[in-house]
Each structure stands twice: as C-alpha cells, then as structure tokens.
C-alpha cells in the first residue's frame, strides 16, 4: 500500500485554494499598506510653496500628481483600514495587544483570589 503524506497534500490544497498563508487577499493588503507608506513619505517631503511658484512644466505636473495623492489619501486610508478589519489582520498576535485592566479582569485572571 502506498504511503500518503497528508500534510504535504493539505499544504498543496491550501496553496491552490489561497487559504491561510497563501491568501492573496492578505498579500494585496500588505501591498496597499506599502503603497500608503510610500505616499505618506512622498507627501511628507513635498514642499508645496516651491511647486506652486515654479514656472517649470515638469514641476507643475509633479504638483498635480501630488495633489491627486493627497486628495485621495483619506479614501486610501479608509480602504486600508476597512480591508484590515475584513481580513482580520489586526490582533493576530494577542500577546502584543494592550488590553484595559479592570478589577474584575484582575480577579478573573487570578482565579478569583
């Protein structure tokens, strides 16, 4: 009888179906986060006054492109936050979460002592 490696078979099925670590939606989320960070970095270094006062056509194009970025930025942030919630990307490691402490939570964690 043939030995079947069920672990490898399961990993192959997960890869094919995009489940777990192979989830393309989570990969897409990470791409959006990287793009949002790049936009923030670019806009943080952007000097509005020097762009507005310039007569150079290339500078005017750069201003228009930057303006498109900052006008779309709130929607991008909202989209990334909504996707984070939908994919349950936040709180995967519960040890890193800071939770509020109350008398009842302390009592229940100490076994009621």
Image (spheres, grey):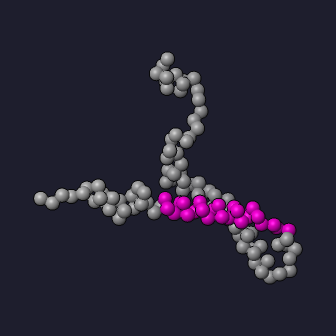
Which residue does the image show at 35% across and 64% down from the upper left?
Answer: 16
Residue farthest along the bottom direction in this orientation: 57
Question: Residue at (54%, 60%) from the top-left corner?
Answer: 30
Q: Residue 98's spot in the image, x, y percent?
A: 58, 38
In this view, the residue in front, 68 or 113, is 113
Residue at 60%, 62% (x, y): give it. Answer: 34
In the image, residue 96 above or below residue 42: above
Magenta highlight range: 26-49
Dividing the image into 4 quarters, which one contains the N terminus? Answer: bottom left
* Picture coordinates of residue 47, whole percent (x, y): 81, 66
Residue 14: where, in percent of width, then height? 35, 59
Instruction: Confirm whether the magenta stretch covers residue 63.
Output: no
Give coordinates of residue 81: x percent, y percent.
59, 54
Residue positioned 53% across, 60% down in the render: 29
Residue 34 shown left or right of residue 59 in the figure: left
> For residue 15, which quarter of the picture?
bottom left
Q: Residue furthest right?
A: 53
Q: Quadrant of residue 33?
A: bottom right
Res 1 seen here: yes
Q: Nearer the viewer, residue 23 or 77?
A: 23
Residue 102 in the figure: left or right of residue 109: right
**Which residue is situated farthest in the left direction here?**
1
Residue reaching furthest to the top: 113
The secondary structure making up most of the magenta span is helix
Figure label count: 0
Q: Is residue 71 visible?
A: no
């Amino acid at each position: 009888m043939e030995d079947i490696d069920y672990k490898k078979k399961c990993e192959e099925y997960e890869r094919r179906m995009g489940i777990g670590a192979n989830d393309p939606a989570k990969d897409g989320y990470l791409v959006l986060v990287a793009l949002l960070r790049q936009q923030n970095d670019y806009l943080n270094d952007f000097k509005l006054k020097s762009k507005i006062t310039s007569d150079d056509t290339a500078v005017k194009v750069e201003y228009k492109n930057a303006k498109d970025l900052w006008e779309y930025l709130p929607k991008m942030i909202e989209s990334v936050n909504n996707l984070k919630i939908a994919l349950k990307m936040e709180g995967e490691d519960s040890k890193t979460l800071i939770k509020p402490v109350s008398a009842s939570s302390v009592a229940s964690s100490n076994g009621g002592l």
